Image: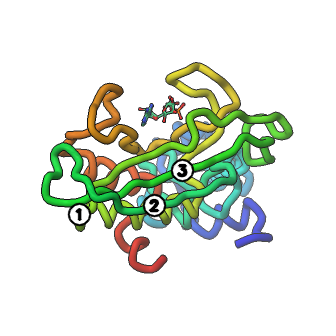
């Protein structure tokens, strides 16, 4: 995918709309009327979800992101291509520990250990060249070692490879900026207690994580092939 221009990437996921309806013209700030729009105002339909956009708006949106060859519909969040993030360099490890989590008495526990050192922000971050801090690492996280827990682990490994588990930004907990933060996929960081709300028991946790992974474009199919 490297080497494709932003225009080429956007074109790949769009179907031409010759005569966009008035509603789309209004929403996209195009000249009103019937019939074809000018080349400069060209409108396309995103191939899978069908939402219509001004071609140049999608190119601008793509240029604002990390330009990984993927595109996300601003309306319904459908992902085209493979979405990747800007998680900084580090390590993800896991192993099974012979204890049960509250709410999962019948199985052992998977412990994931994330370790990310501080560093310097790259072009994919909001302040390139500026250092970022990394607090509370290694961060230990827990999953039940059940069939569903192992499925979540497989998909988290895919998310890690796509740099989607962490990001660099402002921590909503501490208010610190330019620091490593969790990115939209919830993890349980407490083992035997639930003082922070990020512990067990939580019956809906695995399904929530699967849903959050899906929102990042990671589904069960990914766990099989990668
Ligand atoms: N454990 C798991 N998830 C957490 C925690 C925690 N202790 N604190 C916050 N989150 C979740 C939040 O619910 C939110 O969805 O992470 C997301 C981002 O929150 P931030 O506060 O911006 O993330 P971050 O600064 O990375 O985490 C705060 O979590 O693991 C600890 O050491 C870490 O103290 C830090 C805290």
Left or right: 202 with respect to 218?
left
In front: label 1 or label 2? 2
Where residue 101 sits in the image (x, y, percent)?
23, 48
Give the secondary structure at mark 1.
Answer: loop
Q: Earlier in the sequence, mark 2 or mark 3?
A: 2
Please give the name of the residue rendered at 32% of the width and 53% of the height, measured from the top-left corner.
143
Q: Quadrant of residue 109?
A: bottom left
Give the residue pinned by disc 1.
146
Q: Is residue 54 above or below residue 158?
A: above
- Crowding at dot 1, Cα within 10 Å, few <14 / some 14-19 / many 20+, comes out as some
Give the residue pinned by disc 3.
114
Where residue 2 sits in the image (x, y, percent)?
75, 70
Q: Earlier in the sequence, mark 1 or mark 3?
A: 3
Q: Is residue 68 above or below residue 59?
A: below
Q: Quadrant of residue 196?
A: top left
Give the secondary structure at mark 3.
Answer: strand
Please give the name of the residue rendered at 39% of the width and 40% of the height, measured from the top-left corner.
189
Give the residue pinned by disc 2.
94
Name the residue furthest top: 175
């Amino acid at each position: 995918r490297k080497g494709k221009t932003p225009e080429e990437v956007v074109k790949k996921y769009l179907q031409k709309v010759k005569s966009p309806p008035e509603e789309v013209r209004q929403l996209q700030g195009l000249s009103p009327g019937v019939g074809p729009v000018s080349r400069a105002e060209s409108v396309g339909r995103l191939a899978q979800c069908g939402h219509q956009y001004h071609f140049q708006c999608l190119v601008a949106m793509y240029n604002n992101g990390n330009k990984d060859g993927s595109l996300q519909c601003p309306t319904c969040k459908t992902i085209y291509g493979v979405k990747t993030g800007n998680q900084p360099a580090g390590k993800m490890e896991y192993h099974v520990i012979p204890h049960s989590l509250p709410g999962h008495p019948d199985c052992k526990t998977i412990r994931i250990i994330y370790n990310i050192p501080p560093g310097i922000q790259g072009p994919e971050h909001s302040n390139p060249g500026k250092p970022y801090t990394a607090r509370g690492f290694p961060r230990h996280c827990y999953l039940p070692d059940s069939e569903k827990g192992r499925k979540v682990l497989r998909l988290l490994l895919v998310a890690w490879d796509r740099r989607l588990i962490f990001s660099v930004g402002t921590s909503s907990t501490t208010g610190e900026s330019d620091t490593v933060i969790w990115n939209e996929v919830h993890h349980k960081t407490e083992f035997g207690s639930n003082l922070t709300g990020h512990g067990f028991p939580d019956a809906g946790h695995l399904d929530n994580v699967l849903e959050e992974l899906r929102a990042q474009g990671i589904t069960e199919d990914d766990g099989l092939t990668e």
